[in-house]
Amino acid sequence: MLAESHLPSALPSADPAWPEFVCPRCRTPVERDSAAWRCHRCRSVFPELYGIADFRLEPDPWIGIEEDREKARRLIESTPDATFDDTVRAYWDMTASTPRAQALRFIEAVQAAEQRTIEWLALPEHLALQDARSAHPVLDLGCGTGELLAVLATRGVPAIGIDVAMRWLVQARRRGALRDGRQLLVCCNAEFLPFAAGTVGAVTSLGMLEHCRAAGAVLRDAHRVLRAGGSLHMRTVNRFGVLPEPHVGVWGVGFVPRRYADAYVRWANGQRYLHHRPVSAPELRRALAGAGFSDGRVTAAALLSSDMQRLPRSVQSLGAVYARLRRLPAVGRMMSLLAPLLDSYAHV
C-alpha cells in the first residue's frame, strides 16, 4: 500500500475527540488491522489507503471506486513533495477529459475557497461552529479539498471531513493546516456514515447536497450521528433559483422535469447534467422534517462578497436590497423559493 510518510493513521488512538467507527452497512463497531477495518458481523472489509479509511458502499457517480483509488495513487506518486496549490494543478493537468478553460475555473475556485469559508463562518448563524472547547467534532459532509477543515484547524476546532472521492481527500491532506493530521479525513458516502450515533457536535455541508441522489437519506444519517443539542448548517443550490444553474451555466434547468434535464442542458450548451439533483426550498423543508429535525429552517442564502463577484454586473447593485429583505421572516421565506442558494439550519 502506498503511503506518504507524513500521513497519520486514519484514527489516531490517542485522540479521544474522534467518534467510534462503525460499519456503514450494519452499524456494528469495526476493528482495525494493519491495512483495513473489518466488521465481524457482516464480514465487510474496508481498506485504509494513504492514511485515509475508505468506507464507501457506493462509488462517486462520476468515477468508479477502483479508478478513483488509482487516480489518487498516481497523484501522490507524481507529486511527492508538492504544495497544496501545486497538487491541485497537477490533478487537473492529469485530467485530460476536462477542457482546459473549465479546469482553470476549478483551480481558481479551489484557491479562493478558504476565503469564502472564512466569510461563511463569520455569519452569526455559524459562530457556534468555532467553539474549540467542544468535546464533539464538527463533521463536514462533502469536504472536497478541505477548506473548512483547514480554517477550523487554525482555530483549534476538531473536525472530520468526509467525501466520496479519495482523489479530493489526498489533495486536502496537502493543505498546510492538515498535514499534521489535526483533522480526520474519511472516504465514505454521506448517506452511509461510518460513525456511531450521537457522536458529532455539528454537521456542515457546503455545496454537496445537490450532488446526492437522495437528500433525505443524507439528512437522516446526519440526524443519526448528531449528539443531543447538535446542529446542522447547510448551503446548497436552489433547484428553482432565478440565476443560471451554477454547474453548467444554463438558465431554467430546475424548471424542467428532472428526467429531461440532461437533454435540455445538452441542447443548451452541449454539457451533460447526469449527476446533479438540486432541491427546492419546499423539498428541503420536507426532507429536514422527514429526517427528524423538528426545527428545520430554510432561507434564501446570505450573500458573501465572493457570491456578489460571481453575479452578473447588471444585478450586483441589487445585492444590498437582497441582504436586507432576506432578514425579514415572511419576505425571506418567499425569497427562498427563487433564491440562487439556500441556507438551512436545524438542531437535534
Image (cartoon, rainbow, N blue to C red):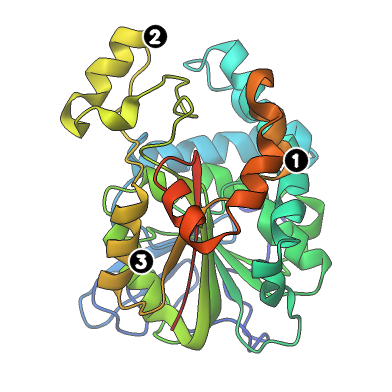
Quadrant including the C terminus: bottom left
Q: Residue at x 60, y 50 (%)?
A: 325
Query: Label 1 belongs to which residue?
Result: 305
| Above-or-below relation of 242 to 232 | above
**Dot 3: what SS?**
helix
**Dot 2: what SS?**
helix
Q: Which mark is residue 219?
A: 3
Horizontal and vertical percent position of residue 150: 74, 58
Mark 2 surroundings: few (<14), some (14-19) or many (≥20) residues within 10 A: few
The total of numbered circles placed on residues is 3
Q: Earlier in the sequence, mark 2 or mark 3?
A: 3
What's the amino acid at mark 1? Ser
- Image-quadrant location for residue 84: top right
What's the amino acid at mark 2? Asn
| Above-or-below relation of 115 to 259 | below
Horizontal and vertical percent position of residue 217: 28, 63
| Horizontal side of residue 81 vs 290, given as left or right | right
Viewer-closest of 239 and 272: 239
Mark 1 surroundings: few (<14), some (14-19) or many (≥20) residues within 10 A: few
**Dot 1: what SS?**
helix
Q: CA distance from mark 3 to mark 1?
A: 28 Å
- Image-quadrant location for residue 140: bottom right
Horizontal and vertical percent position of residue 2: 58, 49
Query: Label 2 belongs to which residue?
Result: 269
What's the amino acid at mark 3? Leu
Mark 3 surroundings: few (<14), some (14-19) or many (≥20) residues within 10 A: many
Asked if residue 114 shows in the view, the reply is yes
